Image (spheres, helix red, strand yellow):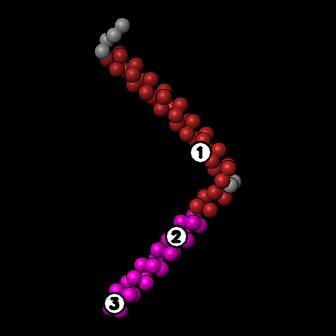
Amino acid sequence: MPSSVKSVTGLVGRVSEELDAEVRSASLDAEAEFGGREARLELERKLLSKLDMRMSILILIYILNIVDRSNVS
């Protein structure tokens, strides 16, 4: 292989390793920021339940709006 291809391949490998290390570090930092994995999962569960409730209400409002527009009374 030409030397330029080898140097590019080596550079890509090093960048890939650095990015992998940063991603692993960021995921560990995110879990530590929220008090560990279990606490983060609990917060995610609470957030999803809030979103589910709000989306349900919005869907109900949307359906009522359609019924009102069609003048079904």
**Place of residue 35 in the rendered image (x, y in percent of width and height, measured from the top left):** 69, 54
What residue is disc 2 on?
20
Q: Is residue 27 above or below residue 56?
A: below
Q: CA distance from mark 1 to mark 2?
A: 24 Å
Taking the spot 57% from the left edge, 66% from the top edge, the residue there is: 24
Quadrant housing the N terminus: bottom left
Classify mark 3: helix, strand or loop. loop
Q: Is residue 5 magenta?
A: yes
Seen from the viewer's position, the closer of residues 39 and 4 is 4
Q: Is residue 49 above or below residue 24?
A: above
Sequence order check, earlier mark of 3 and 2: 3
Furthest residue toward left: 70
The residue mark sitting in front, 3 or 2, is: 3
**Place of residue 68 in the rendered image (x, y in percent of width and height, measured from the top left):** 35, 15
Q: Are marks 1 and 2 in contact (CB under 8 Å)?
A: no
Classify mark 2: helix, strand or loop. helix
Seen from the viewer's position, the closer of residues 58 and 6 is 6
Sequence order check, earlier mark of 3 and 1: 3
The residue mark sitting in front, 3 or 1, is: 3
Sequence order check, earlier mark of 1 and 2: 2
Amino acid type, residue under disc 3 in the picture: Met
Q: Is residue 4 above or below residue 20?
A: below
Amino acid type, residue under disc 1 in the picture: Glu
Q: Quadrant of residue 26?
A: bottom right
Quadrant housing the C terminus: top left
Q: Is residue 23 magenta?
A: yes
Say whether residue 33 is visible.
no
Q: Are marks 3 and 2 in contact (CB under 8 Å)?
A: no
